[in-house]
Image (spheres, rainbow, N blue to C red):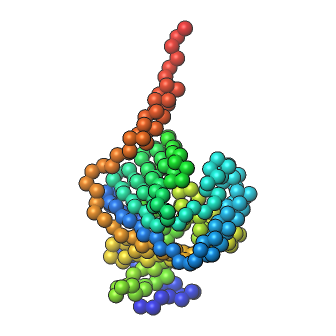
């Protein structure tokens, strides 16, 4: 079946609606392939820095974040792969960059930790009311109105979705929330996702010369636990919180 043309978007059957769900105990690897030359990468770095500067000028919150975390103001090395593990309400992401650096991110009930790959710093948030992530936050833009039809892929038909989104919301949907109706066209890219019509799991997503493919592995059989250094940070924070709320002794 050929792809639908603009203005002739087909209806998506209810049984094919992408629900952004995965088993509570599951794991997958996202492999990232980048097109382009070193000159293209240099141009992307310049465009990224310019977009970040404009966002900081328009949003005091982002300006404050970048002031405290200047490394986010420049484009990082390219992501080569992301390994995701979910066990109940605990989620871990291992992000591997070109050059060999690895960053680890953890989500637990009320807690988020990120061990930065480049500075070595640990970012820690506790008492967070909204730490839960959908299994595929980078695909949060997919909706029925974004369906573009079916496409042949390796001998079978797959569901295709397409949209125009902010690049930063795709690169790191946790750090930057999408804002509707932005006038910054340089920050907007066309993104295309392919979804398996049988499992409703993502097959690939691509934008701006980057293709990310999904491979699902065996389900974990037990709850994952924080590494010792991160556990120590959580424990120290809990002790400080307990001390701060301890009732004062009478004189």
Label tally: 0
Camera-side residue: 107 or 116? 116
Residue closest to the eye, 157 or 16: 157
Q: Is residue 211 above or below residue 152?
A: above
Q: Residue at x 44, y 50 (%)?
A: 107
Residue 133 can be seen in this image: no
Where 169 sits versus 204, above or below? above
Q: Is residue 105 above or below residue 211?
A: above
Q: Name the one closer to the observer, 226 or 202.
A: 226
Q: Who's the residue at 34% across and 61% down the image?
A: 27
Taking the view exactly as shown, the residue that stands out farthest to the top is 251
Q: Nearer the viewer, residue 42 or 215?
A: 42
Query: Horizontally, is 218 left or right of 231 in the view?
Result: left
Q: Position of residue 190 (x, y in %)?
A: 58, 76
Give the vertical position of 57 relative to 214 (above or below): above
Q: Residue at x 42, y 47 (%)?
A: 108
Looking at this view, name the residue that lies furthest to the right: 57
Residue placed furthest toward the bottom: 2
Q: Quadrant of the C terminus?
A: top right
- Where is residue 102 shown, x and y percent of the image? 46, 56
Indicate the position of residue 219 as horizontal and vertical percent values. Answer: 28, 60
Q: Residue furthest left?
A: 221
| Location of the N terminus (image quadrant) | bottom left
Q: Is residue 215 visible?
A: yes
Q: Residue at x 58, y 77 (%)?
A: 37
């Amino acid at each position: 079946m050929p792809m639908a043309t603009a203005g002739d978007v087909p209806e998506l059957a209810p049984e094919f609606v992408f629900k952004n769900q995965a088993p509570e105990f599951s794991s997958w690897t996202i492999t990232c392939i980048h097109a382009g030359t070193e000159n293209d990468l240099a141009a992307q770095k310049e465009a990224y820095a310019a977009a970040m500067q404009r966002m900081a000028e328009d949003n005091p919150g982002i300006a404050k974040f970048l002031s405290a975390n200047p490394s986010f103001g420049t484009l990082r090395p390219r992501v080569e792969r992301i390994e995701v593990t979910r066990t109940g309400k605990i989620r871990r992401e291992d992000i591997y960059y070109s050059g060999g650096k690895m960053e680890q991110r953890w989500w637990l009930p009320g807690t988020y930790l990120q061990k930065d790959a480049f500075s070595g710093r640990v970012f820690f948030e506790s008492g967070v009311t909204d730490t839960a992530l959908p299994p595929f936050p980078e695909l949060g833009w997919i909706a029925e109105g974004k369906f573009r039809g079916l496409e042949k892929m390796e001998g079978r038909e797959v569901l295709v979705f397409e949209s125009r989104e902010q690049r930063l919301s795709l690169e790191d949907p946790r750090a930057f929330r999408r804002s509707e109706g932005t006038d910054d066209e340089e920050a907007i890219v066309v993104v295309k996702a392919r979804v398996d019509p049988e499992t409703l799991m993502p097959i690939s997503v691509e934008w701006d010369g980057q293709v990310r493919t999904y491979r699902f592995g065996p389900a974990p059989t037990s709850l994952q636990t924080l590494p010792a250094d991160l556990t120590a940070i959580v424990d120290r924070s809990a002790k400080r919180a307990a001390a701060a709320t301890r009732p004062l002794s009478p004189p």
